[in-house]
Amino acid sequence: MEGKKEAQLPRDQSFGWLVAVLGGQMASSLDEKLKKIGISLSLWPSLFALWEEEGLTQVELAARCNTANYTTTRVLDSLEALGLVERKKHPTSRRAYQIFLTDKGRELEAAGVQMATECNEDYLSALSEVERSQIHELIKKVISARDSRSI
C-alpha cells in the first residue's frame, strides 16, 4: 500500500504513548469532577500542594508542582480571583511572598481529595492490591531515575 509507512514501534508498545493516553484520560475525568466544586484541573496541583503545606513561596510552589514560575503566577492569580488563596509578604525576603489558603480554599480540600481518590480508584479498579503497589513503585522508579540523570 502506497503512502502507509510501517511504524518502528507500534503505539500500543510505546511506554510514552501509553502514559500519555492514560494521563489524558485521567486528567479529563478529574477535570470533569473538579468543575462540580468550581475549579479546573489547571488549579489542582497548586491547591493540592498548599493543602499539604501552606506558606510556600511561589518558587517553592512551582518546584513542588513541577511548573514554570510564569505558569504558577497565572495559577495563583486565578486562585486569588476565586478567593481560594492569598499572598502575604515573606517575613525575611523583600521580594518573595508566601502563599496561604483562605477559609474557602481550605473548605474545598475534603471534596477535592475525595474526587481525586474516586478518579484514581476508577482507573486502578482493574488491578489487584499487589499490582497497584507495583505500578506505583515502578512509575516512581522511572521518575526518580529520570530526575537523577537531569542533574
Image (tube, grey):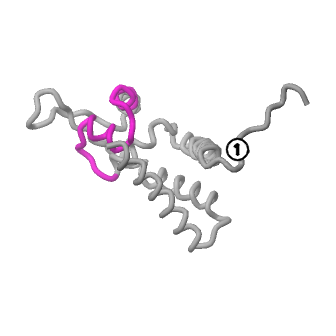
Tell whether position 61 is magenta: yes
- Seen at 36% across and 42% down, the residue is 150
Count residues near mark 1 (Cα–Cα under 10 Å), then give few for <14, some for 14-19, many for 20+.
Answer: few
Tell whether position 94 is magenta: no
Looking at the rendered structure, the number of numbered marks drawn on it comes to 1
Say whether residue 28 is left or right of residue 40. right
Tell me the quarter of the picture where residue 135 sits. bottom right
Q: Quadrant of the N terminus?
A: top right
Vertical side of 25 occupied by 136: above or below: below
Q: Which of 89 and 56 is in front in this view?
A: 56
Q: Is residue 104 visible?
A: no
- Seen at 79% across and 37% down, the residue is 6
What is the three-letter code of the residue carrying label 1?
Leu
Vertical side of 43 occupied by 2: above or below: above
Residue 102: give x, y in percent of width and height.
31, 41
Residue that sits furthest to the right in the current view: 1
Where does label 1 land, which residue?
Answer: 9
- Seen at 50% across and 61% down, the residue is 138
Vertical side of 115 occupied by 130: above or below: below
Tag 1, which secondary structure?
Answer: loop
Residue 51: give x, y in percent of width and height.
35, 50
Tell me the quarter of the picture where residue 36 sits. top right
- Seen at 39% across and 26% down, the residue is 74
Residue 44: give x, y in percent of width and height.
45, 42
Q: Can residue 46 be seen in this view?
A: yes
Stretch of the chain drawn in magenta: 52-75
Residue 130: give x, y in percent of width and height.
56, 74
